[in-house]
Amino acid sequence: MEKPTVARKKIGLLFLSSYSEWAGGTIYILNLIRALNFLRDDLKPEILLFHGYGSPMNEVRDINYPYIYFHQANSPNKLMKVWLRAKRLITRKSAFYNLLPEIVYPYNPKAFLGKTPIHWIPDFQERYLPEMFSEAEIAERRSAQSAIASSGEIVVFSSNDAMKDFNKFYPDHHCDLRLLRFASILPRFDHLDITDLKTKFDIGKTYFMSPNQFWKHKNHKIVLEAIALLKDKNLDFQVAFTGSNKDHRNKEYFQTLQHFIEKEQIQKWIRFLGFIDRAEQLSLMNHATAIIQPSLFEGWSTVVEDSKALNQYIILSDLSVHKEQANENCIFFNPRSAEQLALIIERSVSIPPLRKQEDYSKNIQDFAHTIIQVLDL
């Protein structure tokens, strides 16, 4: 007797970013797909993935999600870009309208125009750190947020912190607000030998990891200042930084960090690894003394979720969203205080923090089932 055919819900996912452009956004969509793969088969939706020409499609295919189809949604070809824009303007619908299921996420009018929107607002960083943005970027972000607030449509947030901000900045909205705290579902990295990796990247026995793209709000400078305070103690440790060194908003940022390192003569404690393979990054994170996450602002930190999934200890800036996100294997510090961070690093070098083993699989299951509820699947 044949099994009855499952009437699957369908969802379109927008996956235009790459690790070098926006690592957090890239990992967000990868985690969505991985989480859905944890569901019972009859609950798994059919996914139509609209990807960019630079998106890490090899990682998507490695997930082996059984009901996924691909469509390249952008192109480096200028003529193709003009055609897509013209079609959208003439028809008032996405160029891919006939391909799309009714549910699309995260909603983007350039890609999904004409379909039922489910919006995602990662954060309101420009409200708190306007100096990190140009006036044009602030205007663009606020215009998009205002349009969403006026729409009365579904809006997804990754944290209560971001949802509270939306209510604060748009108190008269009539939107349907939904909370979707993502979890990290990590790719395999146990095939890598940590000794080989440490040799490859010239990393010593005791090291910390700070795996953030070099955007100014990630606050790498405070880590360097803490190291400068410790240099006369000649402690035996290093801090390894990973991530793209390009900040399109603050183009001189990475160069200012390099100048600070040279001025303070702290090169021996620093390793800039650049953009490295994700599995290598996770292996290095797993074997570090601790992770340092000094950010001045987050919507819901991928670094924190990765650390939780690894049961790794993390030294965290005392943002309210970080306190919402982590309560085990962590210590908080004022992200404006190099002195506080230096004391924590010194103590951790002397007495490495213990890592409490938590069952992160529940976070993944909760994430998977919440996706179904939040996205009406």
Image (cartoon, helix red, strand yellow):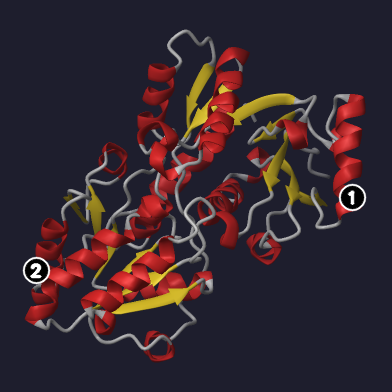
| Location of residue 122 with respect to 18 vertically, above or below | above
Looking at the rendered structure, the secondary structure element under dot 2 is helix
| Residue 83 x %, y % | 92, 42
Residue 346 lies in quadrant: bottom left
Horizontal relation, residue 269 to residue 149: left or right: left
| Location of residue 52 with respect to 205 vertically, above or below | above
Camera-nearest residue between 120 and 274: 274
Horizontal relation, residue 184 to residue 79: left or right: left
| Location of residue 139 with respect to 34 vertically, above or below | above
Horizontal relation, residue 167 to residue 371: left or right: left
The label on residue 34 is none
Residue at 25%, 86% in the rendered image: 205
Camera-nearest residue between 117 and 227: 227
Residue at 86%, 57% in the rendered image: 77
Quickly name the residue at label 1. Answer: 80
For the N terminus, which image quadrant? top right
Of marks 1 and 2, the one in the foreground: 1
| Residue 73 x %, y % | 80, 48
| Residue 196 x %, y % | 42, 91
Quickly name the residue at label 2. Answer: 347
Residue at 79%, 43% in the rendered image: 3
Horizontal relation, residue 368 to residue 327: left or right: right
* Mark closest to the chain's N terminus, 1 or 2: 1
